[in-house]
Each structure stands twice: as C-alpha cells, then as structure tokens.
C-alpha cells in the first residue's frame, strides 16, 4: 500500500522530492522558471499537501520587484550612476530580458511558479519563507570571484545575451529539470567559469538548504530551480553559518593598490621621459597620453548612441579621470547623458519590454544612458592602456 502511494505521488508530482529531516517532511519541487507545467505542479502540490510553510527561491529584493511591477518607475538613474552601480543594473536588466524572451516564447511570465507558490501559501494560510540570498550579495560575490583578466570576457557574454535570439522547444525545457541533463550543464558551466560556480550555485545551494531546514512547521514545500535540487539535498542536514554567505567581500589590498598603479606609472613615464630627453619629448608624451584616452572614450560613447555633448565630455574627461582612481569617465559621461535625456516615469515603466531587443535598448532613454556610461568606461580603460604603452615607447627611445 505504501509503495502504491509512493508511485501515485511520483506520477502526480514527477519533479518533487520527498525528504525527511527529523520531525519535518520536506517536499522539494524542482522547477524551470518559464514552464507552465512547473506552475501547475506547484499549485497542485501546495493544494494537496497543505503545508505549514512554503519556501520560495526569492530574496526580499526580488520579492518586492516581483510583487510590485511598477518598481522600475521608482528608479533614480542619477543615484545609480553616482553610486557606481551601472554595471550591476545592466547585469540585472540583461538577465531579466533573457528570461523574459524565453518566457514570451511559451506565454509564461518568468518566475510564474514562484508567484503561484506565494499566492497558494496565502490561500492555504502557510508561512511564506524567502529562502534565497540577496541578489546583490550573489552578484557582487560572483563578480569579485572572477579574475580581472576574465572580467571583459564575462562582460562581453553579458552584453551578447541582451540581444541574442532565444529559441528552445518545450521538450528541451522540460528536460532541463532532469538531473542528468542538469549535471552535464553544470559540468560545462564549471569548466568555462569555475570561479563563478561557487558563489552563483554552490553557496546558494547551502543558503537555500539552510533556510528550508529552518522553516517553521512539520510540512514544508520548497519551490526552487531544478538546478539547485541536488545541492539542497546534499546540504539539507548540515549546519552552516548563513550570515557568512551574505558578506560582500571588500576589495583586496592589492586591488586598492592596483587602482593607483596606472596613475603612478604615467607620472613616472612623464618624469623619467622628460629627464632622459631634456624636455624635448614632453609634448609628444602629452599627446601620447591624451589622444588614445580621449578618442577611444569618445568613440565608445558614440557607439552607445550618446548625445554629442556627452561624447565631447568623454573626450575631455577621460585623460583626467584615468589619473584619478576615485572618479571614472563613465560616471561623468553618464550623468551628462542622463541630464540631457531626462528619462521619464513612462521610460522606466517600459524597461521590461524594451530590454528584450537591441532596438529597445537604444530607444529607451534609461538603457541608452546606462550603455553610454558603461561604454565610455570601457573606452577610457582601453585608452589608458594604449596611452601608457605609448608613453613607455617614447621613454625607451
């Protein structure tokens, strides 16, 4: 009889694992975030089990964003740029647009199974547990784990994902819930970016497991992405200090020192070059520093579709800001672009739709401004590297 019940449960809820943890019974359902079948399984599971707690793979920030669809309208673009959060916001928008494009293909809102779990928890009177780590901590810990020489590659992949066409069959989507398929994907991911696997996946497995094990009541339903199921099962009975996983690592001492390396090298090149050539090559050295900085920062700004005044600002600011680690060209250029474009509330409201296409990124004043800030930063950095090489070439003559 028990075996028959187990078989019946497995057929009704094929992506749900029944786990025992002391007196608690945990129903761990692995989902695809854009699957209608996942939505249906979550709804039926919670209605059938009537749990004491429902855990969802959301943090407070993502929960508020999902709950309040107008949250983009409250975005303060000037503060984002001033606080140096341009890349973080671009990453968020890129990830959201990628999921939305996939969701649009199947007519399912990304994270619909999480929303269903929230609504069903309210309907059943169950305790809702936000079980995921804060998205800012995850992204910042992931970024900090990437070696500096790989950051540009990751950034390029991120930009590519914004505009890539996404097509996947429903059969392929359902296969993503299969543990063997996921293991292959995780292995491929770890091979390409082993540094990111730990903060992005393994640490979150531990965090989710900890939150699920602490959920109140004896019957708990946990709704998580299928890729986390195996890791959660592994760590569910373990004890971990979750607060340690929430810490955003501070820049290393070497990182702080490296910020001053280029300015120091530039000043040394000017000083020793001036001494060596008795001042005759000073003008050449000045142009060697200014031209690549100014031209590349301006060109990259124009590539992002900046206003003419913003491009000119990049031209003037880059050689100066490259010598000041506390101030980036992208920050100044981004603020000028934001002042010129003056994004409106309706522009913020259109972000979820506009970020799904290249045309939309250029059309929306918010994303256009972010692109200008980001691209001018990249152009300025490349210009500084070329300018420094040129300076040493003149010094070595």
Image: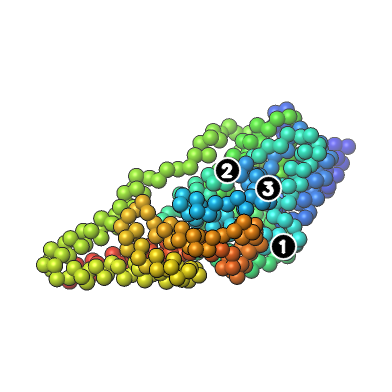
Q: Is residue 283 above or below residue 351?
A: below
Marks 2 and 1 close (CB-CB < 8 Å):
no
The colour scheme used to paint the residues is rainbow
SS of the residue under disc 1: helix
* In the displayed structure image, the side of residue 396 where residue 289 appears, left or right: right
- Mark 3 lies on a secondary structure that is loop
Which badge, 1 or 3, comes first in the chain's sequence?
3
Toward the top, the furthest residue is 23
How crowded is the residue under tag 3: few (<14 C-alpha within 10 Å), some, or many (20+)?
A: few
x and y, in percent, of residue 338 in the image = 50, 60
Which of the numbered marks, if any, corresponds to residue 68?
3
Q: Nearer the viewer, mark 1 or mark 3?
A: 3
Residue 104 is marked as 1
Instruction: Name the disc covering residue 134, or none.
Output: 2
Quarter of the C terminus within the rendering: bottom left
Give the alpha-carbon distance from disc 1 to disc 3, as whole Å: 20 Å
Give me the C-alpha separation between circle 2 and circle 1: 26 Å
User: Which residue is painted at 68% across and 67% down in the image?
Assistant: 167
Q: Is residue 316 left or right of residue 301?
A: left
């Amino acid at each position: 009889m028990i075996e028959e019940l187990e078989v019946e449960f497995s057929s009704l809820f094929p992506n749900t694992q029944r786990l025992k943890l002391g007196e608690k019974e945990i129903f761990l359902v692995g989902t695809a975030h854009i699957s209608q079948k996942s939505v249906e399984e979550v709804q039926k599971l919670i209605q059938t089990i009537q749990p004491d707690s429902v855990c969802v793979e959301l943090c407070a920030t993502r929960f508020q964003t999902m709950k309040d669809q107008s949250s983009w309208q409250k975005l303060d673009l000037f503060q984002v740029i001033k606080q140096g959060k341009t890349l973080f916001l671009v990453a968020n928008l890129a990830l959201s647009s990628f999921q939305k494009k996939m969701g649009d293909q199947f007519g399912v809102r990304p994270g619909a199974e999480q929303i269903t779990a929230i609504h069903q928890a309210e309907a059943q009177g169950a305790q809702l547990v936000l079980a995921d780590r804060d998205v800012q901590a995850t992204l910042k810990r992931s970024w900090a784990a990437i070696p500096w020489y790989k950051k540009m590659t990751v950034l390029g992949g991120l930009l590519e994902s914004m505009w890539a066409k996404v097509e996947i069959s429903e059969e392929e989507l359902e296969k993503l819930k299969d543990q063997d398929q996921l293991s292959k994907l995780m292995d491929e991911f770890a091979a390409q970016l082993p540094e990111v696997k730990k903060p992005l996946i393994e640490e979150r497995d531990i965090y989710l497991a900890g939150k699920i094990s602490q959920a109140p009541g004896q019957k708990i339903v946990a709704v998580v992405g299928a890729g986390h199921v195996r890791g959660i099962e592994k760590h569910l009975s373990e004890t971990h200090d979750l607060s340690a996983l929430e810490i955003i690592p501070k820049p290393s001492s070497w990182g702080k020192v490296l910020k001053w390396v280029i300015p120091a090298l530039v000043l040394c090149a000017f000083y020793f070059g001036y001494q060596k050539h008795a001042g005759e090559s000073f003008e050449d050295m000045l142009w060697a520093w200014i031209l690549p900085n100014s031209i590349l920062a301006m060109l990259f700004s124009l590539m992002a579709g900046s206003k003419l005044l913003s491009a000119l600002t990049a031209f003037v600011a880059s050689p100066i800001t490259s010598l000041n680690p506390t101030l980036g060209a992208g920050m100044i250029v981004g603020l000028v672009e934001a002042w010129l474009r003056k994004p409106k509330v309706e522009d913020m409201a259109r972000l979820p739709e506009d970020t799904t296409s290249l045309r939309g990124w250029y059309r929306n004043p918010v994303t256009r401004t972010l692109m200008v800030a980001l691209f001018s930063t990249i152009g300025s950095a490349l210009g500084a590297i070329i300018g420094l090489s040129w300076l040493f070439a003149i010094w070595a003559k």
